[in-house]
Amino acid sequence: MRLSQSFWQTFKEVPKEAEIPSHQLMLKAGLIQKSGAGLYQYLPFAVKVLHKIESIIREELDKIGSQEVIMSVVTPGELWRETGRWDEMGSLMLQFNDRGGKELCISPTNEEAITDIFRTFVKSYKQLPVSLYQINTKFRDEIRPRFGLMRAREFSMKDAYTFHLDKACLDRGYQDMYNAYAQIFDRIGFDYMIVEADAGAMADSSCQTHEFQVLAEVGEDFIVYCKETGYASNIEKAKTLRKNLEFAASTKIEEVATPNKSTIADVCELLKVPQYQSLKSLVYTAINGEEEKHYLVMLLGDDELNELKLKNYLNCDHLIMAKEAQLSQLGLQKGFIGPYQLESKNLEVLFDSSIDENAGYIVGANKKDTHLKGFTLSRDFNGAKKVDLRLAQSGDYEASGKYQVEIKKGIEVGHVFQLGDKYTQSMKAMIVDQNGKQSAPLMGCYGIGVSRVMAAAIEQCHDENGIIWPAAIAPYHVYFAVIAKSEETKKLAEDIYRDLLEKNLEVVWDDRGLGPGFMFKDADLLGLPLRLTLGERDYQKEGTLEIKVRKAGAIHKVKKEEVADKIQELLKELM
Ligand code: ATP
Ligand code: MG
């Protein structure tokens, strides 16, 4: 590509709303244009990157025998009604009617559509397993689209689906996909972690699910990780232990005055006890269709609630924290709520499993300006329900209690998921099994955020001057900067350019006639793995060109005849 003939442009300034490096750099380097909130147009160099990511994905999925299909981006509402997801998805899904009044949506995912393909073509166990994938546009009306391609509304996803006769076969298919994902992300050059993920309330506990998380400061996911054991889990799911807490002895239960001390911090400071010797009270309302139920959740004073654990436990459609008005309706005193002798019949109490049954705790007394000392679960509460509800924290211990965990931030680039027979059952995608019986196959689904991968790669690899593309997905290999006045040098540049193209090297030739300062700045911003410079003066003096490695900054002086070989050698090292 000759830049003089290219559409490419770079920018000095970017809008303030671009908060994170990948978003800023993609705009500066002329890779994308915003067309609306969470909507982006990919410009030529970004398309090159997407195609490279897609090729790696295709090669690895082909290796495990998955076949590519392309499903319609707009899908009929009736398919989603079969599984109940038309209503369940809520406003995440962009729904509309066509001119005949038929319900349609822009696919946020494609389990229904693939199951419809499956049930049309597959009738017998002999046709199993089936593994299909597509690379296609998805639309999710995200509440907070942000960070450019990282959380867009329209984005490119690779979604794969597998169908199996039994669990053993599903496990094999899952493992193949898991391994293929590891290959894909290794080839891209990511520093990533494979973590246990939350499977949701409905999931059968034997159903596995893992996320592939690229480690980066701007990541929106928190990963609980133990160096010693290798335990890695999304915080949503992580179960860890607190240790070395000196629980207070159980004493007689008695009231203590805590005037105007309505927070755990204030109460514990007043009473001079560590916060974990008190219990925190949180009130939540679980909504299921028309039905509403209220819960009082008790946690150690310095723990936080993991709302997803609570939602999964209650298996509800929505979970909302009670507002002040709700509390008074339930007869509760904000700031002084506690589990002891609760009068409200409308409130079920749940205790986090880290609470010691026999220790004495400070709790709210359900009376203004008053707390109780010595509340002891085994003595003062009948039939307490203990549930793991706390959010893991750094410094907690993993399951064996031997090693501590730390918390890292990640960008979810891929997700593998065993679905069981949820979709095949509800959509009646039955097959005849070995015994001649109708049976619902088991499914797995597997996503990679293709456009998010591009953003994550920049997030993980850039410096103050610009992008540093991993060589495997760089839009081109070499930025050829030419500083030439004489026709002779220009001719030489042309010869070198042609020679490199003939050797299948992907070269951007900066023939715009800019000064070296401008050229080098653009080269750094665009971040191709290598920059080849032909400077007329140097060439005339020393007979050499210069190859600079974008990542390490190393400079190699080479003779004209050595250029292609040296580039190939350096690229090999970088791939
Ligand atoms: P997240 O938790 O980030 O919202 P998700 O778990 O809802 O993602 P999946 O349904 O697992 O996403 O989709 C598969 C993949 O699609 C994700 O692993 C991610 O890489 C990508 N993806 C999901 N939502 C977006 C988005 N809004 N913008 C870009 N990529 C996305
Ligand atoms: Mg996911």
Image: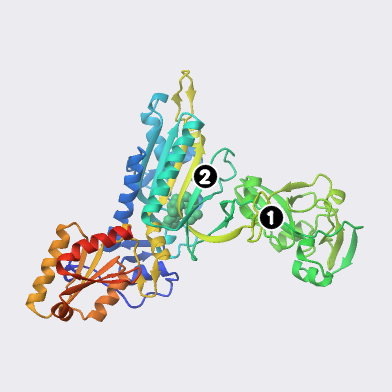
On the picture, is 531 further left or further right than 497? right
Tell me whether the residue at label 2 lies in contact with that at label 1, contact meaning CB atoms closer than 8 angstroms. no
On the picture, is 89 further left or further right than 69? right
> Where is 514 relative to 208, above or below?
below
How packed mark 1 is, by other alpha carbons closer than 10 Å (few <14, some 14-19, many 20 or more), is many
Could you tell me which secondary element the residue under label 2 belongs to?
A: strand
Q: Write down the residue under mark 2.
A: 209
Image spot of residue 137 (x, y percent): 36, 51
- Three-letter amino acid code at disc 2? Thr
Question: 547 or 506: nearer the eye?
Answer: 547
On the picture, is 409 further left or further right than 526? right
Residue 103 seen in the figure: no
Point out the tag, 2 or 1, that comes first from the N-terminus: 2
- Three-letter amino acid code at disc 1? Tyr
In the rendering, which numbered label is found on residue 284?
Answer: 1
Q: In which quarter of the image is residue 35?
A: bottom left
Image spot of residue 302 (x, y percent): 72, 63
Residue under the point 20% across and 79% down: 514
Count the labels in the image.
Answer: 2
The N terminus is located in which quarter? bottom left
Residue at mark 2 to residue at mark 1: CA–CA distance = 28 Å
Image spot of residue 567 (x, y percent): 24, 63
Residue under the point 19% across and 67% down: 6
Residue under the point 7% across and 77% down: 487
Image spot of residue 414 (x, y percent): 44, 51
Q: Quadrant of residue 248?
A: bottom right
How packed mark 2 is, by other alpha carbons closer than 10 Å (few <14, some 14-19, many 20 or more), is many
On the picture, is 137 further left or further right than 486? right
